[in-house]
Image: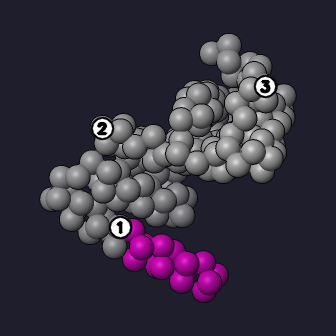
Amino acid sequence: MQAALLFDETARESLRKAAAALDAAEAGGQPQQISRALARVATCHRSLRALSSAEAYFAAALRWARCAGATDLVVDLLCELCETTVQLAQAQEAVRLGEGRAARERTRDHAFEATTLAGRVSDPGWEATALLRVSDVLDRCGDHDDAALLQTRALRLMAGTLRTGAADHDLLPGLGRLADG
């Protein structure tokens, strides 16, 4: 009990610091800095188990990242959104069966966009990492076939990078159901 209280107070202090950093970033007016600050606030909300708030802050961070044209950051935020919305879906399902359906659908939408944009990130290693993150989330959603396809895509990407030093996009398989939209 004491440890949980200490954790919550530490998480609340982190949230206060993140909110102050967000204020400073907004005063500076740089989209990428604002996006990163919003993401820190979202992460703090997620650690406090305020998943709806975390989702809202990650979504705001995503909008700013898109304004900045930062593809790597956009993909990272989409992964964060996937991870948050799948947690939200699981929490809602624990309360009432079927309640998490909308959150799971948002998870799938974010996953589709993340996998679509992943090929545009600056580093093939980061692309593989993002694909594995999305694969894990899809597996938690029950989309085991799509998760396996993404794992295969990531592993082939990593193998191609190791073999040639660069991504071998010809080795990447399709996305099955994800590609169907």
The outermost residue toward the front is: 164
Q: Residue at x 54, y 64 (%)?
A: 47
The outermost residue toward the bottom is: 2
Q: Residue at x 24, y 60 (%)?
A: 25
Q: Amino acid at mark 1?
A: Ala
Is 53 above or below relative to 97?
below
Q: Is residue 105 left or right of residue 172?
A: left
Point out the image quarter for the N terminus.
Answer: bottom right
| Mark earlier in primary sequence (1, 2) | 1
Q: Amino acid at mark 3?
A: Pro
Which marked residue is nearer to the observer: mark 1 or mark 2? Answer: 2
**Is residue 179 something one can see in this rendering?**
yes
| Mark earlier in primary sequence (2, 3) | 2
Task: Check disc 3 and report its element: helix, strand or loop.
Answer: loop
Q: Residue at x 58, y 44 (%)?
A: 79
The outermost residue toward the top is: 180
Residue situated in front as seen by the camera: 159 or 31: 159
